[in-house]
Amino acid sequence: MKVVLQNLTKKFPSRDKRKRDEVIAVRDFNFEIPDGKLIGLLGPSGCGKSTTLNLISGLVKPTEGRIFFGEDDVTELPPENRGIGLVFQNYALYPHLTVRQNILFPLQNLKGKDKLSKEEMENKVIEAAKLVQIDELMERKPRELSGGQQQRVAIARAMVKMPNVLLLDEPLSNLDARLRLQTREEIRRIQRETKITTIFVTHDQEEAMSISDMIVVMKDGAVHQIGKPQEVYDAPVNLFVAKFLGTPPINTFYGRIKENKLYIGDDAVLLVRGVPDTEVFAGVRPEGFILSEEGPFRCDLNRVEVMGRDISVVSTNKECLNPVVRSIIGTETKADIGVDKVAKSGIVRFFLIPHKVFLFDRETEERIDAEVCSL
C-alpha cells in the first residue's frame, strides 16, 4: 500500500515552563512511500524518525499535515483501524504466553466481519511462524528464547494479520553484531516475499543502506535527502549527509579553490572547473585515496592497520576536521605500493579519486556542483 505524507509536522510543548517555544520534532515532512517498498528512516538520536513512525501508526497525532494510506485519509483514524503492524525495539512480548499465544493474540481481538474461526487463526499463526522460521519453538515462552528468536516472534505477531503497512522501530538495537546482521537479512527476505510496504527506523546507516529500497536522512526534525542508498552515498546534498553515511566516515578538510585547483593546505590535489576562487570544505571518502610516492597530497603517517580484506592507512593532516585521516586500500596492492616502506618513511602521499571527493560551501555546507578531475 502506498503511504503519502503531506506537510506532516509535529510540535511538542517545551518542558521548560518559563519558555513558550515549542519543540518541533517533525518539520513539514513530504514524501510518497511507494507500494511494496522498504523505506529506511535514518538519522541521529533526536532527529524525529521515531516520531514520524508514531505519526504514521496513529500513536501520535500530527500538529499539521495529512497522512494517506492509498487514497484514504487516515490522519484521524485510530491505530487499530489503520491496518498496521508494529515491531518495537524491546520486542514487547507477553512473558506469560507461549510463542504460539503471542502470535495468536492479535487475531483473537478481531471482531465483526474480520473475526476468524479457530482453524483459520491456527493456520495463520503457523504461516507467520514459518515465515520467520520459528515454527519449531511454538510452545516456548519468551524467557526460553534468545534475543534474535524473540525479535522473530515480535515480527511474526506483527505480520500475522498481513498488515497494509509494517512499521519497525529500531528492531535490531538489542541484538549483538552477528544476530543483527542475520536478522536484518531476514527482515529483507520477509519483506520481499510478502511485498508489504515497510518503514524501518534506525540510527545505523549500514543497516539502512543494506536493506532499504530508499532511505530518508533526517536531522532536527527535517528531511535532508531522500533517495536510493547508493545514490545518496555517491551524491550527498550537504556535509551532514556526507558525514552521516559511510563507515569509516568521510574525511573532511579545510580547502580552497584557487585558479581552478583544489588546495588542501599547500598541496594542489585536483582540478576543479566551474567554481570561482573560494573557501570550501573538501570531503574525501576513505576509499578515495590511492597511495603513491608521486601523489600530490601529503599526510603524516600514524600507523598502518591490516584488516584482512583491506589495509587502513591512518594518518594526520593539519587541515583535517577529523582526528585522523583514514584511507582504505586493498590488500592485493600491498606489495605494489610498499606499505612497509611507507610505514618507515613517516610521510604518506596520495592521489585522490575525483568522484570520491565532494566540495561543500564553507558557510551553508551545501554541496557545490563542480567538475572535479585529476591534475
Image (cartoon, rainbow, N blue to C red):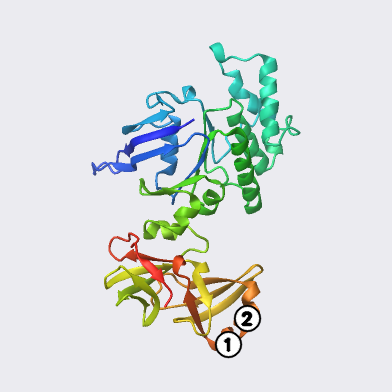
Q: Badge 2 is on which residue?
A: 336
Sequence order check: which comes first, mark 1 or mark 2? 2
The image quarter containing residue 98 is top right
Q: Residue at x 39, y 71 (%)?
A: 253
Q: What quarter of the picture does the C terminus occupy?
A: bottom left
Q: Give the amino acid type for the residue marked by disc 1 in the picture.
A: Lys
Q: Tell me where residue 79 appears, x and y as whole percent.
A: 46, 26
Give the crowd class for mark 1: few <14, some 14-19, many >=20 residues within 10 Å: few
Q: Eyeballing the image, is 59 above or below 336?
A: above
- Mark 1 lies on a secondary structure that is helix
x 53%, y 35%: residue: 36
Disc 1 target residue: 344
Closer to the camera in the image, 215 or 149:
215
Percent of width and height locating residue 3: 44, 33
Asked whether 86 or 357 is in front, the reply is 357
Q: Is residue 271 left or right of residue 19?
A: right
Q: Is residue 113 visible?
A: yes
CB of mark 1 within 8 Å of CB of mark 2?
no
Report helix, strand or loop for mark 2: helix
Rate crowding at label 2 as few (under 14), some (14 to 19) or many (20 or more) other CA atoms within 10 Å: few
What distance separates the C-alpha of mark 1 from that of mark 2? 16 Å
Quadrant of the rendered image containing residue 111: top right
> What is the x, y in percent for residue 44?
44, 52
Residue for point 61% across, 48% down: 175
Residue type at mark 2: give it: Asp
